[in-house]
Amino acid sequence: MATGKQACELRKLSATCLEVDKNSLYSLTEEIGKTLERKMHKLLLISLEFPPVQVAGSFRALRFVTHLPKFGIQPIVVCYNSKQFVKDPIYVCNPSLSALIPSDTPIYQLDVSALEPSRKALVSDPLEDRLSRHFYKIADMFERIRSEHCIESIFVTCPPFNVDLLAHAAKKFFKCPMVLDMRDAWSQWGSSPFRTYFHYRSILSRERRLLHAADAITAVTPQLVDMERKVSRKPIAVSSPACEFHWIPNAYDHSSLPVGMLKAESDRPRYKVVYVGQFYYNSLYETPFGIVPWYRKKPHRWFHYHATRQRWIYRTPYFFFRAWQKFQELYPHYRDRFEFHYLGNIESWLPKMARDFNLEGYCTWHGFKSKQETKQILENSDLCLSTSMKIEGEEDYCLASKTFDYIAARKPVLAFVTNGMQKDFLLGSNIALMCEPDDEVASASQMKELVERGFETEINSGYLQQFSADETTRRMASVILSMPRARGGQ
């Protein structure tokens, strides 16, 4: 039996052994953490538009930043410094979006003047928090990133398209393979013409050079994939890029979308129809009758050049308004059954368009709203309006991300869409009452059917699964991890 002195010694020895075990455990845990971190694929994710900046493109980048770590990829973000957009008339900052960024995400904020010389440079503040630092010189930023991370590949998403300068510099500096993510058309964008054919060729050259610099190219719709593939082959004398093109759509930001039925009740006193977002229509270059020909323009606009014949008036409520007016003419006892609510920046032509159809008294212009305010207004609506641009001889290449918000709000869609991705999505998901934009009589008749019988449809959840955040990120991760390392340098 141990004496009191021996018992004391035993307790000291046990405590020492326990402390050794704790230290070993802490060291082992720290070592495991470092090993796991080393095994994560380090991706330089360049998204100039990133929260708290609230634009459609920033949500796509945020989605990848949030979900890529599940697939063994650690994003290191490069974006514009949001402080420079606090009073910007185009960009809107929503501070609540910053809370959605994973706390362990490294973020390097670039002074906007580094790519846009007309912008005023930020003045360095030595008291600034380390995570909110900014850099004026791109080389300084890259040096800092290389000292802190072993970059293995690069991801560049655009627009804005002046990111091409940063993309070329990043690939040359880090000597890594690069994924180019095209969220929209560049040289083939057609809401307004180029100043001259030579301006178009200059942009086309920049776009083709960026496409050829990439080791993989992704786009948000199949139609945009085909467009970029064609652009990469122009002119014929230039070889096509030796890389793969992939369709990776935008996704919904919800863990899951509703299942079951979407319903608009019959014989409602008023049907509240809501539209969210921008139209990109320019009344200076297009009318309801077509694109304005050169001989009807002022002389200084005679040399304007349209690369494609895109009718962005189809993206506006024009054809909905036209059918609505016809509905009031044909069924005057129902004339007060609809009202229109618009959430977005109000262009001068929009209220005038409503006045031209004698509908302005039924319209409410809410202006730009935060994502939270938009959600509430959608939930209080009856129907959501969907429109799409029309391209002569081709299909529309856009899918509006707001469509997922419409589904999340459990609202049927009133669709005035042309052939293309938006129409394909609405048919595939089975969420819309489809109207023909060019046939106002038939569309007015469908609006009458809605009032008298209501509208009910069952969501095709199986189709929507391919647009989930996990599925789209899995596909993007597959592209990132499959790029050949040997082709990284230039």
Image (spheres, rainbow, N blue to C red):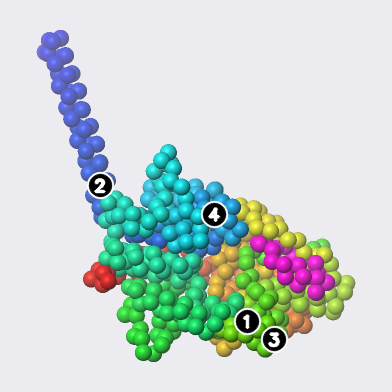
Comparing 305 with 443, the one in front is: 305
Few, some or many C-alpha atoms within 10 Å of disc 3 (few <14, some 14-19, many ≥20)? Answer: few
Tag 3–tag 1 contact (CB < 8 Å): no
Q: Which residue is mark 1?
A: 301
Instruction: Work out how far the residue at label 1 is from the one at label 4, CA to CA, in angstroms.
Output: 32 Å
Q: Which residue is mark 3?
A: 296
The mark nearer the N terminus, 2 or 4, is 2
Residue 33 in sight here = yes
Few, some or many C-alpha atoms within 10 Å of disc 2 (few <14, some 14-19, many ≥20)? Answer: few
Name the kind of residue labelled 2 in the image: Lys
Q: Which residues are magenta?
A: 340-360
Name the kind of residue labelled 1 in the image: Arg
Q: Which residue is mark 4?
A: 85
Comparing 402 with 177, the one in front is: 177
Residue 400 in picture, x, y percent from top left: 57, 69
Name the kind of residue labelled 4 in the image: Phe
Name the kind of residue labelled 3 in the image: Arg
> Does the magenta run of residues contain 27?
no
Q: Judging from the image, what secondary structure is the residue with disc 2 in?
A: helix
Instruction: Work out how far the residue at label 3 is from the one at label 4, CA to CA, in angstroms.
Output: 38 Å
The mark nearer the N terminus, 3 or 4, is 4
Q: What numbered label is drawn on residue 34?
A: 2
* Residue farthest to the front, as pictured: 300
Question: Nearer the observer, disc 2 or disc 4?
Answer: 4
